[in-house]
Image: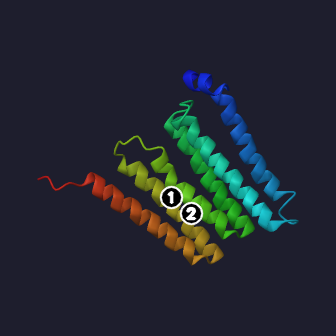
């Protein structure tokens, strides 16, 4: 972390705090001043804030090693949960899809290369339950299909990486 701070001239912790504040600021700004006045702009600003929050949460562990991977993962899961809540509140399918993408990227982004199928598939089950609930509630079948595709892709990747022809 010190080497990164020297190379970039800033403290990594300060970068992450500022990133989180900018991300949260974008989401808050998209709700209060923009939502009624400029709904399309509001969606874009919220999407940018969500992307910043995902990136800062990931960088906290993957780049700066300031927090353990589980803490970084917990932050990314919280962002995914916020996406589900925000998309339900706004009836915004694009926000839900952004949360779906972030939710499915989280295990890959924080992967250590070790095989932990129970936590991985438990997480995917919870993600699917949230996405299917939202899909049913808002009548968004495309979200359910994307969730199914994401889960199937994980299962196929996991089986192909972990299963072998050795006897």
Q: In the drawing, does residue 112 fall left or right of residue 38?
A: left
In the image, 41 versus 100, the foreground residue is: 41
Q: Is residue 105 above or below residue 63?
A: below
Could you say whether the residue bearing mark 2 is in a helix, strand or loop? helix
Name the residue at 51% across, 39% down: 70
Residue 50, percent across and down?
Answer: 67, 52
Report crowding for label 2: few under 14, some 14 to 19, many 20 or more residues within 10 A (C-alpha): some
* Quarter holding residue 157: bottom left
The label number, if any, that marks residue 130 in the structure image: 2
Q: Which residue is mark 1?
A: 126
Q: CA distance from mark 1 to mark 2?
A: 6 Å
Name the residue at 76% across, 51% down: 26
Could you say whether the residue bearing mark 1 is in a helix, strand or loop? helix
Q: In the drawing, does residue 114 fall left or right of residue 164?
A: right
Q: In the drawing, does residue 75 fall left or right of residue 19?
A: left
Name the residue at 45% across, 68% down: 149
């Amino acid at each position: 972390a010190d080497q990164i701070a020297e190379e970039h001239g800033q403290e990594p912790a300060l970068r992450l705090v500022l990133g989180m504040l900018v991300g949260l600021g974008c989401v808050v700004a998209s709700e209060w001043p923009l939502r009624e006045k400029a709904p399309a702009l509001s969606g874009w600003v919220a999407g940018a804030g969500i992307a910043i929050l995902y990136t800062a949460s990931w960088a906290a562990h993957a780049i700066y090693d300031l927090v353990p991977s589980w803490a970084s993962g917990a932050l990314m899961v919280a962002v995914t949960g916020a996406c589900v809540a925000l998309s339900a509140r706004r009836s915004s399918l694009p926000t839900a899809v952004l949360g779906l993408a972030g939710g499915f990227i989280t295990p890959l982004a924080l992967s250590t290369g070790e095989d932990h199928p129970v936590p991985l598939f438990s997480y995917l089950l919870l993600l699917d339950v949230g996405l299917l609930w939202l899909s049913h509630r808002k009548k968004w079948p495309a979200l359910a299909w994307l969730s199914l595709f994401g889960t199937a892709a994980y299962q196929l990747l996991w089986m192909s990486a972990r299963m072998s022809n050795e006897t």
